[in-house]
Amino acid sequence: MTSLDPAPPAPGPPASDRQPLAALAEPVRRVSAGWIGAFATAWLGVWMAQLTPVQLLLPAQIDAVLHPEDWVDSVVAFGAISGVAAVATIIAYPLTGALSDRTTSRFGRRRPWIVIGALVFALSLVALGLQTEIWAIGAAWVAASVGFCIMTAALTATISDQVPVNQRGFVSGWMSAPQAVGIIVGLLLVTELVTDQSLGYVLLAVILLLLAVPFLFRHDQPLAAAERSRVTAKGILAGFWISPRKHPDFGWTLLSRVFVSVGNALGTSLLLYFLMFQLDDPHAEDDLIVLTLIYMVFVILASLLLGRLSDRLGRRKAFVFLASGLQGIAALLLAVFPDLTVAMVAAGILGLGYGCFLSVDQALATQVLPDAASRGKDLGIMNIATAVPQAVGPLIGAAAVVATGSFVLVFVLGAIFAFAGALAVSRVRSVR
């Protein structure tokens, strides 16, 4: 070597000894009660804003606009709008998740997208309440669904970013428990406090924004420039596909979630119509609140208690398998015994199963992700398996009602999908 030759670079530590970069490191420090409280509060706002329209405001708004001679026409319109929203969800979830993975804001990767999603969601709800034509109602609901995806893709990714594995079942329970509370509180607000439909949407939008604020003050580790992968359209599109052959456990977990979520959507999304038209219930809206309250209590108990038990035992699959089976049993009860009292029993069983599923399956999902650098995108894909079935379920249910003139096939299909989800999760190998 001559004096003009450049000196060789100093040898670095072996690849196996290098420390992972900060934002991509596997979290080991337990999150605090304050962090969990802020996280749960944000999800409470999300679920109120998302599920209150699905359960009551949106179908009632569609029915009021159509004034159909045949009630099936209203069910079909609701299903069609939900189906279009599902297509938007398929695109929005992984796309915004991938963008948050690559965000280098000094406020962190996830917080900017939580703000953007909340604003899009809230403004779309306000606009939705003002619409008086079916196409406009559909367009506003699609926009609201996109805002929901942006916000929840970022929120969900914070579990993988900041919560250690042995705390994820419990923390995920605080993502799912507010779902049950959000439904019942939202229904009470728009039926008892604010009876004007458009004001009901405004109230939900305001609550969504206010409840998101506490979590925005929680630390979100910024992504260093060295950690950021280059953003290209080709790269993002390619990332939408995760090979089930290379990552079979991710594939089985995704498939299980699709099946169980479709089953749950079939069992819950058409309940108002079931009460009104199958049971000829003159107090359908009031009884919907009762059923939702029963469902809520069991979802909360199951998601928090069984999520924590799953952490302590270090087991996920058995809990998800049991949860899926319980939802199938609840759906069969509704199919075989179409009665309000039986519906109350089924609501409890369904809540027990779905609460357990929501918390433990979310923890399972974070443990089968292919790459730490793409947590947001990969969990966005996993979230599709929850959000899209909730949107497609009413469409499938509407088709079943049109074909048979009753809700029996709706609930039978719900049971079949739930049991299929149990079989799919049993194929996961890398997580107990």
Image: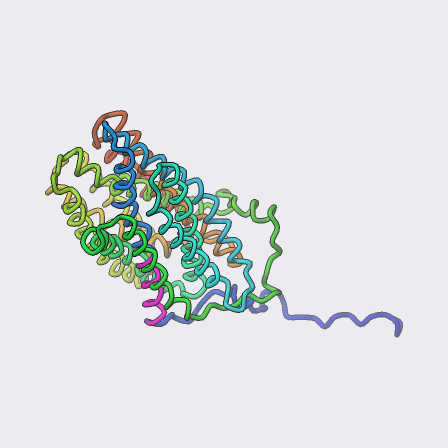
Split into 4 quadrants, where in the image is the C terminus? bottom left
Tell me the residue at 38%/70% (across/down).
31
Image coordinates for residue 185, horizontal then vertical, percent: 23, 56
Q: Nearer the viewer, residue 206 or 257?
A: 206
- In depth, the one of 126 and 289 nearer the eye is 126
Q: Quadrant of residue 29?
A: bottom left
Question: Left of 338 or right of it: where is 135?
Answer: right
- Res 56 → quadrant: top left
Q: Main secondary structure of the magenta part?
A: helix
Is residue 33 at all visible to an observer of this figure? yes
Q: Is residue 369 above or below residue 212?
A: above
Q: Vertical placement of 106 versus 366: above or below?
A: below
Magenta-drawn stretch contains 37? yes
- Return the residue found at the far bottom: 3
Magenta region, residue range: 34-45
Q: Quadrant of the N terminus?
A: bottom right
In the image, 39: left or right of 13? left
**Residue 174: % across, % down:** 31, 61
| Pick the front one: 19 or 106 | 106
Residue 377 magenta-highlighted: no
Q: Position of residue 48 (x, y in %)?
A: 29, 54
> Residue 22 location, x and y as percent?
53, 68
In this view, the residue in front, 325 or 198, is 198
Q: In the rendered image, is residue 426 in sight?
A: no
Q: Which residue is found at the position 36% from the left and 39% from the top? A: 82
Give the residue furthest to the top.
403
